Image (cartoon, grey):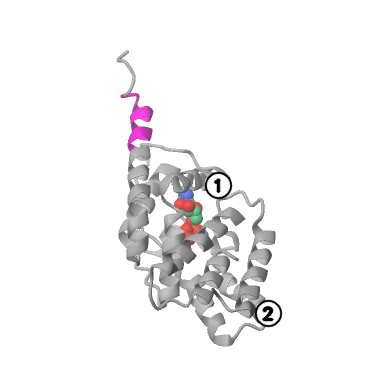
Amino acid sequence: MLEPSKQHIIDQTAAFVREKFLGEGSGHDWEHIRRVWQTTRALAHDTTGANVYVAELGALLHDVADWKFHGGDEEAGPRAARTWLTSLHVEEEAIQRVEAIIREISFKGLGVATPMSTVEGELVQDADRLDAIGAIGVARAFAYGGHKGRPLHDPAIPPVQHDSFEAYKTNTAPTINHFYEKLLHLHERLNTPAARSAAVSRQAFLEHFLAQFLREWSGEDLPPV
Ligand code: ADP
Ligand code: NI
Protein backbone atom coordinates (compact mmCIF):
# COMPACT_ATOMS: atom_id res chain seq x y z
CA MET A 1 0.00 0.00 0.00
CA LEU A 2 1.32 3.43 -0.94
CA GLU A 3 0.95 6.31 1.51
CA PRO A 4 -2.21 8.38 0.75
CA SER A 5 -0.42 11.41 -0.75
CA LYS A 6 1.48 9.19 -3.18
CA GLN A 7 -1.64 7.19 -4.03
CA HIS A 8 -3.38 10.49 -4.78
CA ILE A 9 -0.61 11.43 -7.25
CA ILE A 10 -0.92 8.02 -8.93
CA ASP A 11 -4.72 8.41 -9.18
CA GLN A 12 -4.47 11.91 -10.66
CA THR A 13 -1.84 10.75 -13.14
CA ALA A 14 -4.00 7.78 -14.19
CA ALA A 15 -6.97 10.12 -14.78
CA PHE A 16 -4.76 12.55 -16.77
CA VAL A 17 -3.32 9.81 -19.00
CA ARG A 18 -6.69 8.08 -19.43
CA GLU A 19 -8.26 11.33 -20.63
CA LYS A 20 -5.36 11.91 -23.05
CA PHE A 21 -5.31 8.42 -24.59
CA LEU A 22 -8.95 7.32 -24.61
CA GLY A 23 -9.94 6.19 -28.12
CA GLU A 24 -6.43 6.33 -29.59
CA GLY A 25 -6.34 3.89 -32.54
CA SER A 26 -2.72 2.85 -33.12
CA GLY A 27 -2.25 0.39 -30.25
CA HIS A 28 -1.05 3.09 -27.85
CA ASP A 29 -4.48 3.54 -26.31
CA TRP A 30 -5.40 3.93 -22.63
CA GLU A 31 -6.05 0.19 -22.33
CA HIS A 32 -2.40 -0.46 -23.28
CA ILE A 33 -1.25 1.96 -20.59
CA ARG A 34 -3.66 0.39 -18.08
CA ARG A 35 -2.32 -3.11 -18.81
CA VAL A 36 1.31 -1.95 -18.55
CA TRP A 37 0.47 -0.27 -15.23
CA GLN A 38 -1.25 -3.40 -13.93
CA THR A 39 1.57 -5.70 -15.15
CA THR A 40 4.20 -3.39 -13.60
CA ARG A 41 2.43 -3.68 -10.24
CA ALA A 42 2.29 -7.47 -10.55
CA LEU A 43 5.99 -7.69 -11.47
CA ALA A 44 6.90 -5.30 -8.61
CA HIS A 45 5.18 -7.67 -6.22
CA ASP A 46 7.75 -10.35 -7.15
CA THR A 47 10.79 -8.06 -7.31
CA THR A 48 12.67 -6.86 -4.24
CA GLY A 49 14.05 -3.34 -4.01
CA ALA A 50 11.71 -1.64 -6.47
CA ASN A 51 10.16 1.73 -5.59
CA VAL A 52 6.55 0.92 -6.52
CA TYR A 53 5.54 4.60 -6.62
CA VAL A 54 8.19 5.48 -9.23
CA ALA A 55 7.45 2.29 -11.18
CA GLU A 56 3.72 3.08 -11.31
CA LEU A 57 4.35 6.67 -12.43
CA GLY A 58 6.77 5.40 -15.07
CA ALA A 59 4.23 2.86 -16.34
CA LEU A 60 1.47 5.47 -16.54
CA LEU A 61 3.66 8.02 -18.32
CA HIS A 62 5.87 5.74 -20.46
CA ASP A 63 4.10 6.53 -23.75
CA VAL A 64 2.90 10.03 -22.84
CA ALA A 65 4.51 11.68 -25.87
CA ASP A 66 6.01 8.86 -27.93
CA TRP A 67 8.63 9.93 -30.54
CA LYS A 68 6.65 7.95 -33.16
CA PHE A 69 3.85 10.48 -32.91
CA HIS A 70 5.90 13.61 -32.20
CA GLY A 71 8.01 13.99 -35.34
CA GLY A 72 10.78 11.79 -33.94
CA ASP A 73 11.45 14.07 -30.94
CA GLU A 74 12.80 11.67 -28.27
CA GLU A 75 12.72 14.35 -25.55
CA ALA A 76 8.98 15.08 -25.98
CA GLY A 77 8.02 12.26 -23.56
CA PRO A 78 10.39 13.14 -20.70
CA ARG A 79 9.45 16.82 -21.11
CA ALA A 80 5.69 16.14 -20.95
CA ALA A 81 6.15 13.90 -17.88
CA ARG A 82 8.24 16.58 -16.10
CA THR A 83 5.63 19.27 -16.82
CA TRP A 84 2.84 17.08 -15.45
CA LEU A 85 4.69 15.83 -12.35
CA THR A 86 5.97 19.33 -11.52
CA SER A 87 2.37 20.57 -11.57
CA LEU A 88 1.64 17.96 -8.85
CA HIS A 89 4.72 19.02 -6.82
CA VAL A 90 6.33 15.58 -7.16
CA GLU A 91 9.85 15.53 -5.72
CA GLU A 92 12.72 16.14 -8.18
CA GLU A 93 14.37 12.75 -7.63
CA ALA A 94 11.19 10.85 -8.58
CA ILE A 95 10.74 13.06 -11.66
CA GLN A 96 14.27 12.27 -12.83
CA ARG A 97 13.71 8.55 -12.41
CA VAL A 98 10.47 8.70 -14.40
CA GLU A 99 12.20 10.73 -17.15
CA ALA A 100 14.92 8.06 -17.35
CA ILE A 101 12.30 5.31 -17.70
CA ILE A 102 10.65 7.11 -20.63
CA ARG A 103 14.01 7.84 -22.31
CA GLU A 104 15.32 4.30 -22.00
CA ILE A 105 12.26 2.06 -22.43
CA SER A 106 11.87 1.78 -26.20
CA PHE A 107 12.99 -1.03 -28.42
CA LYS A 108 15.49 0.51 -30.86
CA GLY A 109 16.25 -2.34 -33.27
CA LEU A 110 17.48 -5.91 -32.84
CA GLY A 111 21.13 -4.87 -33.01
CA VAL A 112 20.78 -2.11 -30.38
CA ALA A 113 21.07 -2.77 -26.62
CA THR A 114 18.47 -1.00 -24.45
CA PRO A 115 19.61 -1.38 -20.83
CA MET A 116 17.52 0.28 -18.12
CA SER A 117 19.39 2.29 -15.48
CA THR A 118 16.88 1.63 -12.66
CA VAL A 119 15.10 -1.44 -11.30
CA GLU A 120 11.78 0.43 -11.72
CA GLY A 121 12.64 0.93 -15.39
CA GLU A 122 13.34 -2.78 -15.75
CA LEU A 123 9.83 -3.55 -14.52
CA VAL A 124 8.11 -1.05 -16.82
CA GLN A 125 10.15 -2.17 -19.83
CA ASP A 126 9.23 -5.79 -19.11
CA ALA A 127 5.54 -4.88 -18.73
CA ASP A 128 5.60 -2.91 -22.01
CA ARG A 129 7.29 -5.81 -23.80
CA LEU A 130 4.86 -8.40 -22.40
CA ASP A 131 2.07 -6.32 -23.96
CA ALA A 132 3.80 -6.56 -27.36
CA ILE A 133 3.73 -10.40 -27.45
CA GLY A 134 0.97 -12.98 -26.96
CA ALA A 135 -2.53 -12.54 -28.40
CA ILE A 136 -2.62 -8.86 -27.49
CA GLY A 137 0.77 -8.31 -29.04
CA VAL A 138 -0.44 -9.83 -32.33
CA ALA A 139 -3.56 -7.64 -32.27
CA ARG A 140 -1.49 -4.52 -31.54
CA ALA A 141 1.01 -5.21 -34.32
CA PHE A 142 -1.75 -5.39 -36.92
CA ALA A 143 -3.54 -2.39 -35.44
CA TYR A 144 -0.30 -0.40 -35.74
CA GLY A 145 0.38 -1.70 -39.26
CA GLY A 146 -3.18 -0.80 -40.33
CA HIS A 147 -2.81 2.65 -38.81
CA LYS A 148 0.34 3.13 -40.92
CA GLY A 149 -1.28 1.63 -44.05
CA ARG A 150 1.18 -1.30 -44.16
CA PRO A 151 0.45 -4.62 -45.94
CA LEU A 152 0.03 -7.68 -43.71
CA HIS A 153 2.79 -9.60 -45.42
CA ASP A 154 4.94 -9.58 -48.56
CA PRO A 155 7.23 -12.59 -49.02
CA ALA A 156 9.31 -10.55 -51.52
CA ILE A 157 10.41 -8.20 -48.70
CA PRO A 158 12.66 -10.15 -46.31
CA PRO A 159 13.02 -9.09 -42.67
CA VAL A 160 16.26 -7.32 -41.74
CA GLN A 161 18.20 -6.69 -38.53
CA HIS A 162 18.28 -3.00 -37.59
CA ASP A 163 21.61 -1.98 -36.09
CA SER A 164 20.64 1.61 -35.36
CA PHE A 165 17.61 3.36 -33.94
CA GLU A 166 17.49 5.51 -37.09
CA ALA A 167 17.18 2.43 -39.35
CA TYR A 168 14.52 0.89 -37.07
CA LYS A 169 12.53 4.13 -36.89
CA THR A 170 12.39 4.77 -40.62
CA ASN A 171 11.48 1.20 -41.58
CA THR A 172 8.14 0.77 -43.41
CA ALA A 173 8.08 -3.01 -43.89
CA PRO A 174 4.92 -5.19 -43.82
CA THR A 175 3.64 -6.14 -40.38
CA ILE A 176 4.81 -9.78 -40.51
CA ASN A 177 8.39 -8.50 -40.79
CA HIS A 178 7.93 -6.81 -37.41
CA PHE A 179 7.57 -10.27 -35.86
CA TYR A 180 11.10 -11.19 -37.03
CA GLU A 181 12.55 -7.74 -36.49
CA LYS A 182 11.28 -7.37 -32.91
CA LEU A 183 8.40 -9.39 -31.45
CA LEU A 184 9.91 -12.92 -31.59
CA HIS A 185 13.02 -11.69 -29.73
CA LEU A 186 11.42 -9.74 -26.89
CA HIS A 187 11.18 -12.79 -24.61
CA GLU A 188 15.00 -13.11 -24.66
CA ARG A 189 15.36 -9.50 -23.60
CA LEU A 190 13.29 -9.38 -20.43
CA ASN A 191 14.89 -8.13 -17.22
CA THR A 192 13.03 -9.94 -14.42
CA PRO A 193 12.33 -13.63 -13.68
CA ALA A 194 8.65 -12.80 -13.09
CA ALA A 195 8.35 -11.38 -16.62
CA ARG A 196 10.29 -14.27 -18.15
CA SER A 197 7.84 -16.65 -16.57
CA ALA A 198 4.78 -14.70 -17.83
CA ALA A 199 6.34 -14.59 -21.31
CA VAL A 200 6.41 -18.37 -21.80
CA SER A 201 2.78 -18.86 -22.92
CA ARG A 202 2.72 -15.52 -24.77
CA GLN A 203 5.81 -16.53 -26.74
CA ALA A 204 4.30 -19.92 -27.57
CA PHE A 205 1.16 -18.22 -28.87
CA LEU A 206 3.18 -15.76 -30.98
CA GLU A 207 5.11 -18.60 -32.63
CA HIS A 208 1.95 -20.64 -33.17
CA PHE A 209 0.16 -17.66 -34.74
CA LEU A 210 3.05 -16.96 -37.11
CA ALA A 211 3.37 -20.58 -38.23
CA GLN A 212 -0.38 -20.82 -38.91
CA PHE A 213 -0.42 -17.44 -40.72
CA LEU A 214 2.35 -18.61 -43.07
CA ARG A 215 0.62 -21.97 -43.66
CA GLU A 216 -2.58 -20.20 -44.68
CA TRP A 217 -0.68 -17.66 -46.79
CA SER A 218 1.10 -20.33 -48.83
CA GLY A 219 -2.04 -22.48 -49.07
CA GLU A 220 -0.25 -25.53 -47.73
CA ASP A 221 -3.25 -26.32 -45.49
CA LEU A 222 -5.48 -26.70 -48.61
CA PRO A 223 -6.00 -29.71 -50.88
CA PRO A 224 -3.70 -29.68 -53.96
CA VAL A 225 -5.14 -27.99 -57.07
P1 ADP B 1 8.13 -0.07 -27.42
O1 ADP B 1 7.44 0.62 -26.33
O2 ADP B 1 8.72 -1.41 -27.08
O3 ADP B 1 9.11 0.82 -28.15
P2 ADP B 1 6.47 0.57 -29.52
O4 ADP B 1 5.91 1.77 -28.87
O5 ADP B 1 7.49 0.70 -30.58
O6 ADP B 1 7.01 -0.41 -28.42
O7 ADP B 1 5.33 -0.26 -30.14
C1 ADP B 1 4.05 -0.25 -29.65
C2 ADP B 1 3.22 -1.30 -30.35
O8 ADP B 1 3.20 -1.06 -31.74
C3 ADP B 1 3.79 -2.68 -30.13
O9 ADP B 1 2.78 -3.61 -29.91
C4 ADP B 1 4.54 -2.92 -31.39
O10 ADP B 1 4.66 -4.25 -31.74
C5 ADP B 1 3.73 -2.16 -32.41
N1 ADP B 1 4.62 -1.73 -33.48
C6 ADP B 1 5.65 -0.86 -33.42
N2 ADP B 1 6.26 -0.76 -34.62
C7 ADP B 1 5.58 -1.60 -35.45
C8 ADP B 1 5.70 -1.96 -36.82
N3 ADP B 1 6.67 -1.45 -37.59
N4 ADP B 1 4.82 -2.86 -37.32
C9 ADP B 1 3.84 -3.38 -36.55
N5 ADP B 1 3.67 -3.09 -35.26
C10 ADP B 1 4.53 -2.20 -34.72
NI1 NI C 1 3.93 1.16 -24.39
Q: Residue furthest front?
A: 1
Point out residue 88 in the picture as x, y percentages from the top left corner.
Answer: 68, 79
User: Is disc 1's CB within 8 Å of ligand 1?
Assistant: yes
Specify the segment rendered in magenta: 211-220
Residue 88: assigned label: 2
- Label 2 amino acid? Leu
Occupied quadrant, residue 182: bottom left
Say whether residue 161 is visible. Answer: no
Question: Mark 2 falls on what kind of element?
Answer: loop
The structure residue drawn at horizontal position 36% and vertical position 36%, both measured from the top left corner, is: 155
CB atoms at circles 2 and 1 under 8 Å apart?
no
User: Is disc 2's CB within 8 Å of ligand 2?
Assistant: no
Viewport quadrant of the C terminus: top left
Point out residue 72 in the picture as x, y percentages from the top left corner.
Answer: 55, 64
Label 1: few (<14), some or many (≥20) within 10 Å?
few
Residue 106: assigned label: none
Viewport quadrant of the N terminus: bottom right
Residue 148: assigned label: 1
Above or below residue 140? Residue 113 is below
Magenta stretch prevailing secondary structure: helix
The structure residue drawn at horizontal position 60% and vertical position 65%, both measured from the top left corner, is: 64
Point out residue 107 in the picture as x, y percentages from the top left corner.
Answer: 42, 62
Above or below residue 212? Residue 20 is below
Foreground label between 2 and 1: 2
Occupied quadrant, residue 22: bottom right
